[in-house]
Image (cartoon, helix red, strand yellow):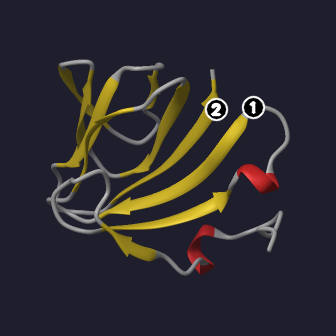
């Protein structure tokens, strides 16, 4: 079944998952997957990290991921370096690099994750 081409983030049913061995459970929805997209796109995800949860540190193979923080604040780990992120932060996770994200605030952290084949 194809994903709808138009969606409102406020109306999505989200799944509760542990992301890459991170702490706690985040809320997640794959908006578009490989069957929905043309070109080298793998997926577009929407994620909501409650306070104290994380997307665990992990490494991908031959693809790139872009994180776009929509709401909230957190601490991003990228190839061994850590730095704060906030709404508007855009992070490029390059092929074979390590990355993870922790919500360090008292409110939710919302983001898009876009992955493409490199």
Q: What is the secondary structure assignment of the residue under circle 1?
A: loop
Q: Position of residue 102 (x, y in %)?
A: 21, 46
Instruction: Give residue 69's quadrant in the image.
Output: top left
Q: Is residue 43 above or below residue 64?
A: below
Query: Given contact means CB atoms under 8 Å apart, are the residues at marks 1 and 2 in contact?
Result: yes
What residue is shown at x 52% (from left), y 58% (from top)? 46
Instruction: Give residue 41's quadrant in the image.
Output: top right
Q: Where is residue 16 in the image (x, y as percent from the top left)?
A: 36, 75
Which image quarter is the C terminus in? Answer: top right
For this view, does 52 lie left or right of residue 60?
left
Q: What is the secondary structure assignment of the residue under circle 2?
A: strand
For disc 2, the neighbor class at 10 Å (few under 14, some 14 to 19, many from 20) is some
Q: Mark 1 highlights which residue?
A: 40
Which image quarter is the N terminus in? Answer: bottom right
For this view, does 29 lie left or right of residue 27?
right
Q: Mark 2 highlights which residue?
A: 116
- Count of numbered badges drawn on the protein: 2
What residue is shown at x 29% (from left), y 37% (from top)? 58
Q: Earlier in the sequence, mark 1 or mark 2?
A: 1
Q: Position of residue 116 (x, y in %)?
A: 64, 32
Q: Residue furthest front?
A: 61
């Amino acid at each position: 079944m194809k994903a709808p081409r138009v969606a409102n983030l406020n109306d999505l049913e989200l799944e509760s998952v542990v992301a890459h061995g991170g702490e706690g459970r985040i809320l997640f929805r794959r908006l578009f997957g490989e069957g929905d997209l043309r070109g080298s796109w793998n997926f577009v995800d929407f994620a909501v990290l409650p306070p104290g949860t994380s997307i665990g540190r992990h490494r991908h193979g031959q693809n790139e991921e872009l994180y776009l923080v929509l709401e909230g604040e957190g601490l991003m780990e990228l190839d061994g370096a850590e730095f704060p992120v906030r709404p508007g932060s855009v992070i490029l996770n390059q092929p074979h690099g390590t990355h993870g994200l922790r919500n360090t605030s008292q409110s939710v952290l919302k983001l898009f994750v876009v992955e493409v084949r490199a």
